[in-house]
Image (cartoon, grey):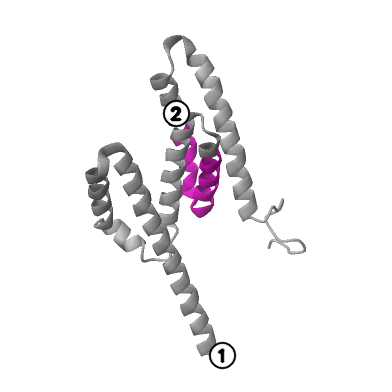
């Protein structure tokens, strides 16, 4: 039975590493797409090359940790929320809520999304609103943030099986 257990651990470890590699590839693609949008094709390629040669991501993408997944979802949620604020796009808001929930679920440091969203919301008001329309823009941003937050909480709750308690029904915490 020892060899069967060892085989199960081996398969689970390889599966976790493969999934983490997928998150690493997804992060590289995301960085390329955003950098290409902002700086053109050459900027996208330079960003992708720097990412691919980064020792931190070369190491963490091959390990079975949640660091790369947390980074991917944190960056994705931030970018989508900024896009939602710029375009007032419901689709970006839904995607930002999904990515925010995944960021917090993947890694508890995903809670850094709260101050990041606050900074993005404030920057949007100061950079994009005319001097007389800042309060109206702030109210719209607050509504967008409320919707994104509600969806993120629903995603987190879904990952935990919609439970109200810290334990499964019938189990005791000792």
Image spot of residue 112 (x, y percent): 46, 41
Residue 115 visible at all? no
Q: Quadrant of the N terminus?
A: bottom right
Q: Which residue is mark 1?
A: 1
Vertical placement of 90 versus 131: above or below? below
Q: Residue at x 42, y 11 (%)?
A: 131
**SS for callout 1:** loop
Of residues 18 and 113, the one nearer the viewer is: 18
Residue 55 in the figure: left or right of residue 156 = left
Q: Residue at x 47, y 40 (%)?
A: 113
Which stretch is magenta?
Answer: 94-120
Q: Residues within 10 Å of mark 1 (few under 14, many from 20)?
A: few
Mark 1 or 2 closer to N-term?
1
Image spot of residue 37 (x, y percent): 32, 40
Q: Main secondary structure of the magenta part?
A: helix
Q: CA distance from mark 1 to mark 2?
A: 58 Å
**SS for callout 2:** helix
């Amino acid at each position: 039975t020892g060899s069967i257990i060892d085989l199960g651990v081996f398969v689970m470890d390889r599966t976790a590493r493969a999934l983490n590699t997928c998150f690493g590839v997804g992060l590289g693609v995301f960085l390329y797409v955003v950098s290409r949008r902002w700086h053109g094709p050459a900027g996208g390629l330079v960003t992708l090359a720097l990412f691919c040669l980064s020792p931190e991501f070369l190491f963490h993408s091959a390990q079975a940790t949640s660091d790369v997944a947390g980074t991917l979802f944190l960056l994705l949620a931030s970018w989508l929320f900024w896009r939602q604020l710029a375009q007032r796009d419901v689709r970006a808001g839904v995607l930002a809520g999904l990515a925010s929930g995944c960021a917090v679920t993947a890694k508890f440091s995903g809670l850094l999304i709260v101050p990041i969203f606050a900074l993005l919301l404030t920057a949007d008001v100061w950079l994009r609103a005319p001097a007389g329309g800042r309060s109206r823009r702030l109210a719209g941003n607050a509504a967008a943030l409320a919707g994104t937050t509600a969806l993120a909480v629903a995603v987190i709750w879904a990952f935990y099986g919609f439970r109200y308690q810290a334990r499964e029904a019938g189990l005791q915490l000792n």
